[in-house]
Image (spheres, grey):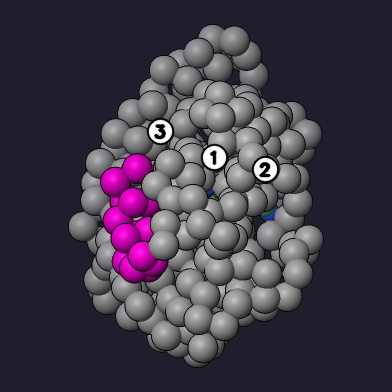
Amino acid sequence: MELDKTHITDFESELICEFFSAMQRQGPGSPEMTKKALGFLGFVDNLSQKKIADIGCGTGGQTMILAQNCLADITGIDIFPDFINIFNDNAKKQNLQDRVRGIVGSMDNLPFQKDEFDIIWSEGAIYNIGFERGLTEWRNYLKKEGFIAVTEASWFTVDRPVEIEEYWAYHYPAITTIANNVHTMQKCGFVPFATFTLPENCWIYNYFIPQIPVNESIVKKYSGNKTVERFVEANRYEYEMYKKYKEFFGYVFYIGRKI
Ligand code: SAH
């Protein structure tokens, strides 16, 4: 989900919440890839007594997968209260509320203690603060030898067609190559541990296809509203850009260990 918070109106913010609340995930990803990333951390004790923060957790799609696959205590944090309400309802439905809780807060001012967490997780959200700034600031909340696992939109190639360069220059000019992000991770005080690209299904089946009926229903509901029309148009264009240029960019999991 891309949003320019410097120019966002209340209605746009409500629209984004309404739209993305209707989906299990608010960014590209999948249960398989969350489990794969967790597998790299190689903990043998099921993470019981360990603490995970999931930053920019949204409604908690990936958080519940983490919780189903380990025994850690998990705090999800997101700026949108509506997402956190859904998150906590989901935790309760799955009877995970004793060790999974969602709180409202901002990733640039986290209400955590220094060295509090064993793992910091963040899928499809670090772009809101920037990859380097996120790694640098969030590192403070990690224990020594703790892990960070984040996904970030990245270039797969050094050269790209102009149309997709321009699309990203507008939406997220800081997008860079996998090699550059790995270098940044090292510079920020992490040993790069694992990096893998998310497969197409994370975008197509878990992100764009679930948007199709929601795009249709909000256009009907707010018939004639220009903001809604532009929003839906942007969602559809994002899908077109992905289909056309998916060999040049995608989401990548970056896992690092704090030194
Ligand atoms: N991790 C989820 C959501 C990704 S979408 C998933 O992968 O499905 C990005 C999320 O970041 C949204 O839920 C958005 O509300 C949240 N977000 C944006 N800016 C934020 C900020 N400053 N602090 C905390 N969360 C933020």
Q: Per the image, is 157 magenta? A: no
Q: Earlier in the sequence, mark 2 or mark 1?
A: 1
Q: Is residue 38 magenta?
A: yes
206 displayed left or right of 85: left
- Quadrant in which residue 89 is drawn: top right
> Magenta residues?
31-44
Please, is residue 248 above or below residue 157 in the view?
A: above
The count of marks equals: 3
Mark 3 to mark 2: distance in Å? 30 Å
Q: Are marks 2 and 1 in contact (CB under 8 Å)?
A: yes
Real-space Cα separation, disc 3 to disc 1, in angstroms:
24 Å
SS for callout 1: loop
> Which amino acid, by three-letter code, is at mark 1?
Gly
Q: Position of residue 61 (x, y in %)?
A: 48, 38
Question: Which mark's residue is nearer the viewer, 3 or 1?
Answer: 1
First reached walking from the N terminus: tag 3 or tag 2? 2
Identify which amino acid the numbered label 3 is placed on: Arg
Report if residue 23 is visible in the image.
Answer: yes
Marks 3 and 1 close (CB-CB < 8 Å): no
Would you name the residue on which mark 1 appears? Answer: 60
The residue pinned by badge 2 equals: 102
Name the magenta segment's main secondary structure: helix
Q: Residues within 10 Å of mark 3 (few under 14, many from 20)?
A: some
Residue underneath mark 3: 236
